[in-house]
Image: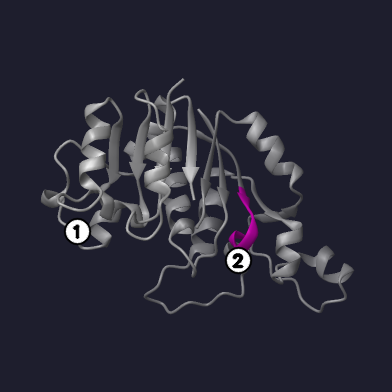
Amino acid sequence: MATLHTVNKSPFERNSLDTCLSLCNNSGSILLIEDAVVGALRNTSVSERLVKAIESGVKIFALGEDLKARGLPEDRVIEKITLVDYTGFVKLATENDRVQSWL
Amino acid sequence: MKFTIQVNTGPFTHQASDSAYRFTLAALESGHEIHRIFFYHDGVNNATMMCAPPQDDRNLQVLWTELAAQYELDMVVCVAAAQRRGIMDKKESERNGKEFANIAPGFQISGLGQLVEAAVASDRLMVFGD
């Protein structure tokens, strides 16, 4: 059973991304939305943890529109994170067996 | 696929209402079914027709109402959350001895049972909130 986890808090403000990463198994996917998109950037205190999760099999996505709304350029995003739009968000929700929102 | 959308925050407190709207629109445009949109906690503030933001700001209530009309959506507002925040239809307004009703077209007031029913009847429950 694959789970899509949506995280909407900045990892520099709350620890929901951290908790999500520790509970997400390697068949899971994590989508960073709203303020959580800042966690998708390279060279931050959380980027190493995200890269490790990706290397262990977790798929990580970020909502491109929320990055853009915050003035964050796509070229600063960790290479292995896939950017999606809202249609991609819907697709991720259908491809996984369930969705867990980390509010 | 059948989705139910739960909205827990108001349009002027957090991005979640906008995210929920954009997700709902994308799901409908991708050919999916929205079984119900349930407005809970501060999310009930999406349903007041007395909201008048500046013209260059988006008016989510109007956007929801238009979307509901276009796609015949079932938009339910939690009665207990709504009463606390002054969102009422005519019946609730009279029952509480108030002068006005302010619920916007397309929204209806009902109970938490509607959320449970929707969660059971849908393939996915999407929760948007703070």
Name the residue rendered at 46%, 52% in the picture: B21
- Quote the CA–CA distance across marks 1 and 2: 30 Å
Report the residue marked by disc 1: A72
> In which quadrant of the rendered view does residue A26 lie?
top left
Name the residue rendered at 45%, 39% in the picture: B28
Which is closer to the viewer, label 1 or label 2? 1
Dot 2, crowdedness within 10 Å: few (<14), some or many (≥20)? Answer: many
Three-letter code for the amino acid on which mark 2 is drawn = Asn
B2 or A77, nearer to the observer: A77
Residue A90 at what x, y percent from top left?
40, 36
Tell which subunit mark 1 falls on. A
Q: Which residues are magenta?
A: B38-44
B35 or A95, nearer to the observer: A95
Report the residue marked by disc 2: B45
Residue B42 at what x, y percent from top left?
61, 63
> Residue farthest to the top?
A1
- Asked if labels 1 and 2 share a chain, the reply is no
Name the residue rendered at 37%, 61% in the picture: A13
Name the residue rendered at 51%, 51% in the picture: B67
> In which quadrant of the rendered view does residue A38 lie?
bottom left
Residue B69 at what x, y percent from top left?
56, 51
In reply to whether residue B40 is colored magenta, the answer given is yes
Q: Is residue B30 visible?
A: no
In reply to whether residue A100 is colored magenta, the answer given is no
Mark 1 secondary-structure assignment: loop
Three-letter code for the amino acid on which mark 1 is drawn = Leu
